[in-house]
Image (tube, rainbow, N blue to C red):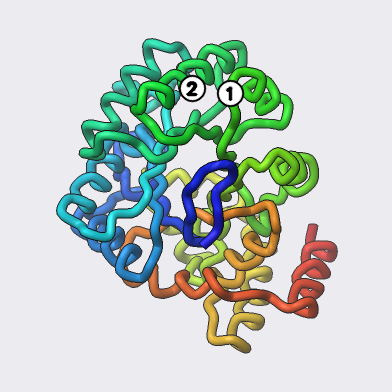
Amino acid sequence: MRQLGNTDMQITPIGLGTWAIGGEGWFAAWGPQDDHDSIATIHRALDMGINWVDTAAVYGFGHAEEIVGRALRGRSNRPYIFTKCSRIGNADGSVTSVLKAASIRREVEESLRRLQVDVIDLYQIHWPLPDDDIEEGWRTMAELKTQGKVRHIGVSNFSVSQMRRAQAIAPISSLQPPYSLINRGIENEILNFCEEQNIGVIAYAPMMSGLLTGAMTRERASALPKTDWRRNNPEFQEPRLSRNLLLVDLLRTIGQQHGRSPGEVAIAWTLRQPAVTGAIVGGRHPEQIDTIIGAADFRLNKKELREIEAFLREHP
């Protein structure tokens, strides 16, 4: 267990992400998803010891939250529930960012209803947009905490300067940024700041949205459904794809020496950072949990870390 920032929550190094289980009908969907598989995946994660689930109101325009609520109904080993606000779905599948007080207050009530809970353990601003409204949005988040609607408040995708602006109003418990072997943008300024300020970091996409799992191939990437946002992502297309699959080959070679999957090596690499409290790992099928759970207690040795760094230097 690891303490999340300035909260009293002790969380497992891995948490279950629910972006993909939101299903289709919005611009960042992952293609078709079966709700029964989603619920079984959540149950499997809990049975394997994961004690927090991260979701968002925008995932499937509320559908992911509804699935989480259904999956946890009647469960004795209930996890911490983290969710996010500020992204409002439109009828055409697009999203508008809103940080106005009235909108956030309406969102939290809708999330509480869908999740079937009386209080949210961690409520996060999903994106710092519009930038001019960050102060109004964060002030409202602090008020929700005072009112007992949420236990802790955090941010996602914020820069250091944006976090400083929020801190002038109320403390930040956590930051949720993207972080992986392919996306290392937070390594210098942001991670250092969070460590200094005791802000917990829960990194999302540590396997780059499935690219580093070992299951992605050129054929599978080219056959992704039209409703899967990854189909148009440059990392899943040439020339980036070939470089990324070479990286997976290295992760596979390292993992084989320990009985670990490439994905577990990729996750463990993110968890090596002292400032990273936990990694959010998505799952769409129960068996996927079995292929990543080992990352929670896997540690890369110095030689393996040097091999990975050498690859990243040679293949920038």
Q: Residue at x 55, y 73 (%)?
A: 297
Residue 238 in view in this figure: yes
Q: In the visual, does 22 lie left or right of 166?
A: left
Q: Is residue 94 above or below residue 78?
A: above
Q: Residue at x 37, y 22 (%)?
A: 147
Rendered location of residue 139, percent (x, y)? 52, 16
> Would you call the spot at circle 1 few (<14 residues within 10 Å), some (14-19), or many (20 or more)?
some
Q: Is residue 101 above or below residue 257?
A: above
Q: Residue furthest left?
A: 74
Contact between labelled residues 2 and 1, with CB atoms less than 8 Å apart: yes
The C terminus sits in image quarter: bottom right
Q: Amino acid at mark 1?
A: Ala
Label total for image: 2
Query: Quick one: 116 or 26, which is closer to the camera?
Result: 116
Task: State the residue position of label 2.
Answer: 142
Q: Earlier in the sequence, mark 1 or mark 2?
A: 2
Q: CA distance from mark 1 to mark 2?
A: 6 Å
Q: Residue 238's quadrant in the figure?
A: bottom right
Q: Residue 105's quadrant in the figure?
A: top left
SS of the residue at dot 1? loop
Q: Residue at x 42, y 51 (%)?
A: 17
Query: Quick one: 207 or 224, which is closer to the camera?
Result: 207
Q: Amino acid at mark 2?
A: Ala
Residue 170's disc is 1
Q: In the visual, does 1 lie left or right of 107?
A: right
Q: Is residue 169 above or below residue 279?
A: above
Rendered location of residue 162, percent (x, y)? 67, 24
Rendered location of residue 34, percent (x, y)? 23, 54
